[in-house]
Image (tube, rainbow, N blue to C red):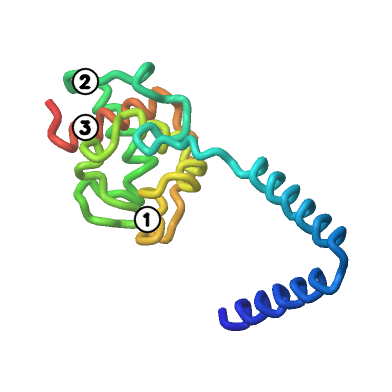
């Protein structure tokens, strides 16, 4: 860190000496180049449109609705999670490889959960809460190739696990 600061100080001083010893045309040209580089960097910067309540994916409040617990969907979700999820997640709040599922439907919307389990990589890269979980768990959730129906069934099983009736 000290080397970096020292290097930057030397470069800044050298540039200041070069431009102060040159004519005004060189200084004006350098300012123009710096301004152009700033404009290019600003244009290349991505806009921050990530919504942590919705997640990254095709699901939102317009295409995911929940009501009373659907027992048949919850049963299918339990079967799917038995083969795709339970090797890394417990039904309690205890961490296994990944975080436990207890209370997940109270912390996240159904469409956020569906976006995450069907589209984990972009969410891991963008969602601050998922990134903090990654620091604890140290393993990225793999894409399990779940269908939209599978994801909805799993959400219903998670709701059942959280005591929704």
Q: x, y (%) of residue 32? A: 78, 51
Quadrant position of the C terminus in the picture: top left
Tell me the CA gap for discs 2 and 1.
Answer: 32 Å
* Picture layout, residue 44 above or below residue 26: above
Q: How many marks?
A: 3
Query: Would you call the spot at circle 3 few (<14 residues within 10 Å), some (14-19), or many (20 or more)?
Result: many
Q: Nearer the viewer, mark 2 or mark 1?
A: 1
Inspect this view and state whether residue 113 appears: no
Give whichever of discs 3 and 1 has the lower sequence position: 1
Name the residue at 32% across, 46% down.
86
Depth check: give the residue in front, 17 or 165.
Answer: 17
* Picture layout, residue 46 above or below residue 114: below
Determine the residue located farthest toward the front in the rendered image: 24
Answer with left or right where residue 32 lies relative to residue 73: right
* Picture layout, residue 58 above or below residue 27: above
Q: Which residue is mark 2?
A: 70
Answer with left or right where residue 124 lies relative to residue 164: right
Disc 2 element: loop
Give whichever of discs 2 and 1 has the lower sequence position: 2
Q: Which residue is mark 3?
A: 159
Disc 3 element: helix
Name the residue at 13% across, 34% down.
163
Depth check: give the residue in front, 70 or 38.
Answer: 38
Q: Return the mark for residue 132.
A: 1
Tell me the CA gap for discs 3 and 2.
Answer: 10 Å
Query: Would you call the spot at circle 2 few (<14 residues within 10 Å), some (14-19), or many (20 or more)?
Result: some
Q: Nearer the viewer, mark 3 or mark 1?
A: 1
Query: Would you call the spot at circle 1 few (<14 residues within 10 Å), some (14-19), or many (20 or more)?
Result: few
Q: x, y (%) of residue 111? A: 35, 28
């Amino acid at each position: 860190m000290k080397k970096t600061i020292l290097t930057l100080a030397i470069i800044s001083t050298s540039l200041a000496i070069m431009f102060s010893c040159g004519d005004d045309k060189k200084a004006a040209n350098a300012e123009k180049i710096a301004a152009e580089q700033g404009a290019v960097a600003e244009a290349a910067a991505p806009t921050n449109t990530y919504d942590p309540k919705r997640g990254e994916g095709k699901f939102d409040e317009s295409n995911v609705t929940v009501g009373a617990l659907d027992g048949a969907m919850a049963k299918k979700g339990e079967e799917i999670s038995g083969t795709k999820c339970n090797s890394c997640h417990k039904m309690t709040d205890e961490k296994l490889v990944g975080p436990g599922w207890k209370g997940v439907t109270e912390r996240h919307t159904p469409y956020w959960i569906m976006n995450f389990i069907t589209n984990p990589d972009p969410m891991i890269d963008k969602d601050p809460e998922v990134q903090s979980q990654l620091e604890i768990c140290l393993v990225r959730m793999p894409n399990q190739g779940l269908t939209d129906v599978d994801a909805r069934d799993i959400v219903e099983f998670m709701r059942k696990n959280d005591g929704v009736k």
